Amino acid sequence: MKFTLAWLKDHLDTQCTLQEICDGLIALGHEVEEVVDPSQTLADFRIVQIKDAQPHPEADRLQVCSVDDNGTIIQIVCGAPNARAGLKTVLAPIGVYVPGIDIVIKKGNIRGQASNGMLCAYSELGIDGNSDGIIELETDAPIGVSYITYVNKNDPMIEIAITPNRGDCLGVRGIARDLSAANLGILKPLDMSEYEGEFDSPINWQISPDSQDIVPRVTGRYFRNVVNGECPDWMAARLNSVGQRPISALVDITNYIMIDLGRPLHAFDADKIKGDTLYIRRAKSGEKILALNEKKYECTPEMLVIGDENGADDIAGIMGGERTGISSETKNLFLEIAVFDPVSVAATGRTLNIHSDARYRFERGLDGESPDLLAGYIARFIQMICGGKVSHKVIAGSGVVWQRHITFNPSLTQQLTGIDLPHQEQNDILDTLGFVIEQQKDGVWQVMPPSWRNDIDGQADLVEEIIRVAGYDKLPMVPLPSLSVVAQPAYSESQSRPIYLRRMLVAAGLNEAVTFSFMSQEDAKLFDGGDESLTLVNPISSELDCMRPSILPNLLNALTRNLNRGVKNVRLFEIGPIFQDTSEKGQSLSCAGILNGDFQLGDWQDKARPVDVFDAKKMMEQILETLGVSSQSVQIQTPGPAWYHPGQSAIMTLGKTVIGSFGMIHPEILSAFDVKMPVAAFDCNVSAVPLPRKKNVARPLLKLSSLQPVERDFAFILNHDVSAAKLIRAVKAAAKEHITDISVFDIYAGAEIGEGKKSIAVKIHLTPKDTTFNEAELQKISGDIIASVEKHCSGILRG
Amino acid sequence: MADIDSLREKFLSDINQAENLDQLTSVKVDALGKKGAISSELAKLGQMDADSRKQSGQLINAVKQEITSALAIKQETLAKQALELKLKSEKIDVTLPSRPAPQAKMHPLSRTMEEISAIFADMGFVIAEGPEIETDENNFTALNIPAEHPARQEHDTFYLKPDADGNRPVLRTHTSPVQIRTMRSTSPPIRIIVPGRTYRSDHDATHSPMFHQCEGLVIGPDIHMGHLKATLIDFCRSFFGVDELPVRFRPSYFPFTEPSAEVDIGCSREGGGLKIGAGDDWLEILGSGMVNPRVLENCGYDSTTTQGFAFGMGVERLAMLKYGIPDLRTFYDSDLRWLHHYGFMPHDIAGLHTGIV
């Protein structure tokens, strides 16, 4: 909402400075977004007269001017062709900042001639106007006077943000009323007396029965023989200051009153109305209106329109139609002052996607009394500027029901805010804001909000009104009462998991990414997602139209971006939501990552080692360990999901629950993401991993054996398709109570062990229980291991 | 016996002249080996009579001992020389770089959310969570934002396709629906914060379609706006680490709070740079207010006996202001150069014991 200080003072009798007004607006809840004060920026530019202008002896295009600067003759070198003796113009004296060209004027010497200032063009002042040469002023312009004061363009513009509840402040008068409540001036009276008019309006309203509920009030008035010329200069200047281009007197008046009183109007050219009735009704399905913005809108039957015998030509409360609109030839005017249902206007505006100043005000709620109370004021205003004769009012609608009573206990102010404000002061604040208060004997008030405050509907609203005016700086500072002596953890066990995972993965050398929760449906489909129910109806772009089924596609895209920037060895992870469906359970927490390039970096002594599937597996194991799951309880099933290399991937399960996957990304997926190097990836569904059983804080007593452990190496020849996991299970099964660790230290395949065979060598760590192993026991364990491998894996000990 | 003396002389001289451990070993063998000269002399003792044996024995043993000890001393000297030589030959240019190890960083948003959590944890808040695909009811209606309310239009909501029953899920536009979920499932007192992802269909230099908010809700007997003020001032000062940070409360409007306040912190823009602290300018940082009685009623609370406050803040904005990150869009780009510059080490733990700033 833009207005000027002088405009505000039309409604507010105040001695406050611009700064005081701005501070007051902020304190009242109207955020000041911008202030433009030409009296500050252009104060030092003054009117001078050129007494003499001679060609510069050294330069063809320059003139040396003698200038009368308030009685002192100064010399200025000027390049403007219109600089001539006798011309009154504007001087930028030495030391002044010139906004249009962003320089400070210094004493100069131009080709041997002193120059003590600059004669200005409009553009140099940052003002609209013919800037072919310097400014030409009337001959009676007073020398020495500030130019900006002389042309009366020194009115500061203030722009404030109006919160959606304060429709009443979408007019200058509403803002003035708020300021007056805060003792920053006195609200001037507005002449709201009735204006009878001289004749019956030849046009009348008819509200269709199905629209009565959304047209509580509409006033019409016929203006005969008006002159729609240009609006007066003062009005044009104000409209310009707030960014409205003057068009013609009648259009400008409707705009002016909308900004001045927050009262949108619509003017029909009465001669373009067919018949003597304007029908306010629901639109017919598919009914089209060519609106004043020159766009055609197709209406639906919920929408409220106004029209004549030729059809609808006004989208009520939003925008008028081209066919019956005002033009410069308009002689007879029919004016609409209405209150429509805000929800209906909002819905129509949203459906048609029209953003107009009128809609903005209608949907925030208008003063319910304004169609009746302002009809006289507006009639006089139009007549004052455009002349003509005014009809009696024509009124339709049963009236706006705005009256409501709120039972208010003024002690609630302290209860809700902690501010102890005398009841009289609370009463005075509400009174200045236009609320009517009936005090009842038990100290409880009946408060009736004014017709322009649709937003007030309860006691809490009254409290806000009171402390808003009293000042939020009165709020006391009271620390929250302590809940417990010992600080309780803010995070639950499951909420702490992302924190632990993040630290572990960063310490392991992976960088944390945060990517969008959506991606292209195309990418989502590659990762088993892309269901229609998870696509956005109104995405920002097709790149971001589907809730992600996995984090990996986003990380692959991030990888591509990094590789394109020349960043190598990309290791990224993200901990965030993934979506299986739209239900609450359909969202789960994923911890996924990608590894690319070298996992072990090379240097002058070691060769680099590119990432492989075991790097991804290691990450999964570390993740599970961080989540309290021992890797021994996890089963590995091959292959992994389709986006992995079928021979180098797996899913991990805990019982029947899939808790994650790892592997090398499938080459086809890589090429879909334009990645030309292998990528290892892991993806853990953290939500699927159960929380570990609660353990005692104190650990069980540690029993350390003093007996010597023993290591034994075995190599087994197996069929190629026997997995290492199967072999290890077989070994372990042979001597469960003694084997404390099994590690694979060699894999071999070659002609001498036979086609389709492989050898796996394992080192087995045996820990005795009660007494040190003797040779016989070790023989037995070895025999058991060999037998078990033979039985379960058809493997034989390599000779 | 002259023999022994000359042997002694010879061996001591040989020991002295030995240049390396090999030579010394051969001297040792010559002297004390099984067939060594001294050993041979000792062997001869058996053939002597008792007196001579005793006399010669003493003499030879003394020489043996002298040679043994000289050998040991020389052995140590030569070993030391040998080691020095070996060490000298093993010299490496230790200014060469060590083996490269990857260094990674935590995202600044994670750090910022942990900082926020740490400060509020100290004030007795716990973390609450909710789904990001929300119902219209939780995201809007229960929060007193009816269907055609202008405040709803300002939310630029992302919608998903309606389900079979015609319900149209939304991506939550703020973390406030978790207020509703918490109040509907628990009884007062409540003291929660809700850090999380939020979504609005807006994408330009200062808006991202996804961003993070942190909501707060306090419900309890007699919790009033003075508590709100102290809580949020303490938070702002702790978060930015400025004890005297000016904090301003302005009236504002949110459908779910009444009265509502926006919170500004002091700053200075002198010299082009932004500095948080006392200055001539203000930065908007938080929205807050007393929970609207209608919201309390929507959650089944009796608004005449229950009250409290709520607040919400933009996590990216806080991170940008605190850590001098100029561009919002870079948060989600996963540019490793950016992460290395603005990110945090895994040991940078935000906590009251290690500090928030």
Image (tube, coloured by chain):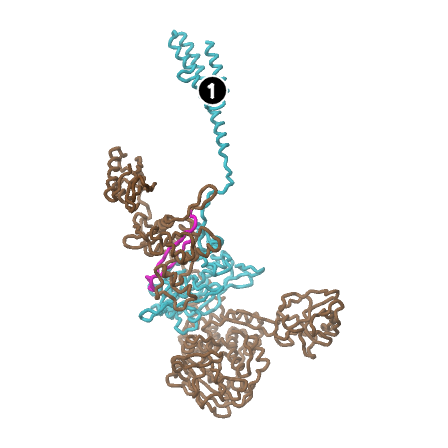
Chain colours: A brown, B cyan
* Rendered position, B289 above or below B100: below
Q: Is residue A783 magenta-colored?
A: no
Name the one closer to the observer, B100 or A771: B100
Q: Position of residue B256 (x, y in %)?
A: 41, 69
A773 displayed left or right of B58:
left
Residue at 62% over, 76% down? A152
Report the predominant secondary structure element of the magenta stretch.
strand
Q: Which residues are magenta?
A: A572-599
Q: Position of residue B238 (x, y in %)?
A: 47, 57
Q: Amino acid at mark 1?
A: Ala
Name the one closer to the observer, A92 or B268: A92
Report the residue that reaches farthest toward the right. Answer: A57
A654 displayed left or right of A357:
left
Q: Quadrant of the C terminus of chain A?
A: top left
**Residue bearing mark 1:** B70
Name the one closer to the observer, B3 or A379: B3
* Rendered position, A53 above or below A206: above
Q: Position of residue B346 (x, y in %)?
A: 43, 50
* Rendered position, B8 above or below A536: above
Q: Chain of mark 1?
A: B
Crowd rating for badge 1 (residues with CA inside 10 Å; few <14, some 14–19, many 20+):
some
Q: Is residue A593 magenta-colored?
A: yes
Name the one closer to the observer, A690 or A295: A295
Q: Position of residue A377 (x, y in %)?
A: 52, 85
Whether residue A33 is visible here, answered yes or no, is yes
**SS at badge 1:** helix
A350 displayed left or right of A7:
left
